[in-house]
Amino acid sequence: MQINKKKNTSFVGNLSRLIVGGGVSSAIGLLIMPILTRVYLPSEFGVFSLFFSLAAILSVVSCLRYEITIVLPSEDEDAVNLMVLSLICASLFACFLFLLLFLFSDDLHFMPGLSVIGNWIYLLPIVVFFVGVSDIFSYWNTRNKFFSRIAYAQVVNQLSGGLLKLGLGLWMQPVALALIFSNVIGRIFSLFVYFFSLTKSDFGFIIEHSSIKSIVDVAIRYRDFPLFGSWSILLGVLSWQAPLFLLVHFHGLEVLGYYALAFSLMELPMRFLLGALGRVFYQQAADYKSKEQLAESIEGLLQHLVRSLLFPLLVFMFIGEDLFAVVFGESWREAGLYAEFMCLWMFFWFITAPFTKIFGILGKQKCQLWWNISNFLLRVSVLCLVGMYEDPRMTILALAIAGVVIYFSKIVMTLSIVDLKFTRLLVMIAREVAIFIPVGVVLVVLDGVVDYKFMKLGVGVLTLVMFGIYLAFRLYPKINYRSEVMND
């Protein structure tokens, strides 16, 4: 019995499937959000963000990072046993977490906002388990090139969760619980997509080739992933989630709600593209036979990312505050200002995101670990020092500057690992900044004239729409990666 796989799929073919699914799910999220901001208060978004920050921290280590190794083995038998091993780890971790909550749930009062949830905190192990299982199935489908399944799951998750947030927010108490419960149900529906898409041959192959001896064997063979990868990714996630807890400590749930909305909307339009790029790139990069092939692919993809992302983010830096006030309501204007602060930070994060897993492919988990340690220490130090001044805007700006520094260092480190000079990146950035300058001058002039404030917003939005059309019809069809001509 053989595992069911897709054959002869190209980089662009795989990418297009994920982009369509991710684009639809992101569009659903963007369309629903202006309604949600009029149903939920910033403080309620803050509680929701706090809960899922805990879930994010715990879920990345729930499988001990064995889930990402599913793509790596040349033999399907090894991949099957890695998948079963990951499922065992996720199950045991969820049970252990539930036991801890049962014994120590009363001690969670030190986290502001979680007291509102009450006994619903016991949803945390369930969420962590579902996220872990979803990642396992996602990597299994990535290995077998069933990217359409991943796309369907994304759409189902976003659509079901979004509709439930609209409905439950009108009657469920506490209101913040409606956001949490809706997200859980959305994840359950997406898991149904993964589960029911598995064929009979998949189940038969998994049962036939999984055994305790084989599971122990792959667990030992890929032990560097839990030993180094787990700590590394945990620090990486902590560096993202720690700001939320510190923001609550220094500035309260309302400021956290502003930050959470700004961050989620800044990453949402990019996440579907970069998630698709990263997933397909990881599958292809695992097949490369030399560092030269990997370097060539990285340079081509990096150039494309810079051309696609820097210009629109620079435009958004001038219109974000006004755009948020118009779309989400005047009460969310502060979130728009936070989003403006984040633009350059988001840019450097976005261009590094697809390449993160090459550290594992090239056996550089220790480099990734040390970078994550530096990232965590820098973010926490900056927030603790600046947060004492009790100025939330200064805190968000300082966090954004720290993000620029740390992610610029990561892209430089990534390029050096594959023997590429970072000066090539600087040339790419300089070219895009030069293209932006005329538009930037117009936006600055309009911003200085009080009567033309809305004209500035109109010019900025029109520029973004025109640039999106350019990407769709002129830039993306010209992608010419080496992997397009590779047969899998």
Image (tube, helix red, strand yellow):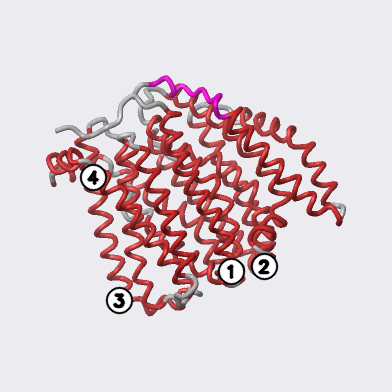
Dot label at residue 42: 1
Region of the chain picked out in magenta, as a range:
476-486
Quarter of the image with the N terminus in it: top left
Marks 1 and 3 sit apart, C-alpha to C-alpha, by 31 Å
Residue 23, magenta (yes or no): no
**In the image: residue 309, left or right of residue 175:** right
The residue under label 2 is 331
Q: Alpha-carbon distance for marks 2 and 4? A: 51 Å
* Residue type (three-letter) at the residue carrying disc 3: Leu
Mark-to-mark CA distance, 3 and 4:
30 Å
**Residue receiving disc 4:** 219
Label 3 Cα crowd, 10 Å radius (few <14 / some 14-19 / many 20+):
few
Look at the numbered discs 2 and 1 and tell me whether their residues touch, using CB distance below 8 Å: yes
Magenta stretch: residue 483 in it?
A: yes
Sequence-earlier tag: 2 or 3: 3
From the viewer's perspective, tell me whether residue 312 is left or right of residue 134: right
Q: How far apart are marks 4 and 1 (CA)?
A: 44 Å
Q: Can the viewer see residue 396?
A: no
The residue tagged 3 is: 103
Q: What element carries label 1?
A: helix
